[in-house]
Image (cartoon, helix red, strand yellow):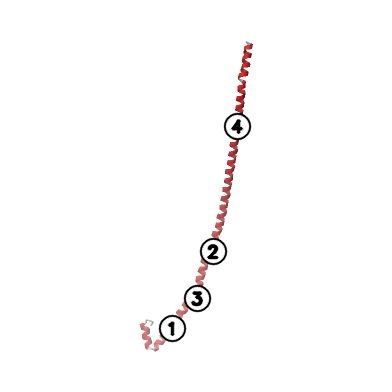
Amino acid sequence: MKIYKLLVIILFSIFLLPGVVPAKENISTFERETTEKLIRIETKVDEGQKAINQRIDDLGKRIDDMGKRVDDMRGLLYVVLGGMIALVGFVIWDRRTALAPAIKRTKDLEERGEKIEMALREYAKKDPTLMEILKELKLL
């Protein structure tokens, strides 16, 4: 019986162990390939994540640039509004300045007209024909 057991062990070793060893190699090869694929996938994911982070940083820079442009536009708006207010002030001042001589001239003409009218009334007291004309014109 001992021989029988020994023979079984030897046969078992001869036939089954060589089949187990290559299977172990195949598994380790499979594990190695799987590990390499996982490493490549991780590398690609890391590269993709870096690219996404770079795009986010670029977008942040563009937003900052837009903020600076808005600040510049705000300054330009203040300059334009200041210019408009100055222009309105100048127009009002110029109008008053331009109208002052016309107003003075109108007052002078009114005073002259009143003086001429008074002179005609005084002269009409002496001349009856002129008095009739002034009454027809309703100046007396």
Which of labels 1 and 4 is toward the front? Answer: 4
How far, Cα to Cα, is label 3 from label 1?
A: 22 Å
Question: Where residue 85 sits: x, y (%)?
Answer: 52, 64
Q: Mark 2 = which residue?
A: 83
Residue type of the residue flagged with mark 3: Pro
Mark 3 is surrounded, within 10 Å at the Cα level, by few (under 14), some (14 to 19) or many (20 or more) other residues, namely few
Residue type of the residue flagged with mark 4: Glu
Residue at horizontal 51%, vertical 70%?
94
Q: Earlier in the sequence, mark 1 or mark 4?
A: 4
For mark 3, give the secondary structure.
Answer: helix
Closer to the camera in the image, 14 or 58: 14
- Discs 2, 4 touching: Cβ within 8 Å: no
For mark 2, give the secondary structure.
Answer: helix
How far, Cα to Cα, is label 3 from label 4?
A: 102 Å
Q: Mark 1 = which residue?
A: 116
Question: Where residue 112 sits: x, y (%)?
Answer: 45, 81
Q: Quadrant of residue 26?
A: top right
Which of labels 2 and 4 is toward the front? Answer: 4
How far, Cα to Cα, is label 1 from label 4?
A: 122 Å
Q: Mark 4 = which residue?
A: 33
Which of labels 3 and 1 is toward the front? Answer: 3
Above or below residue 15? Residue 82 is: below
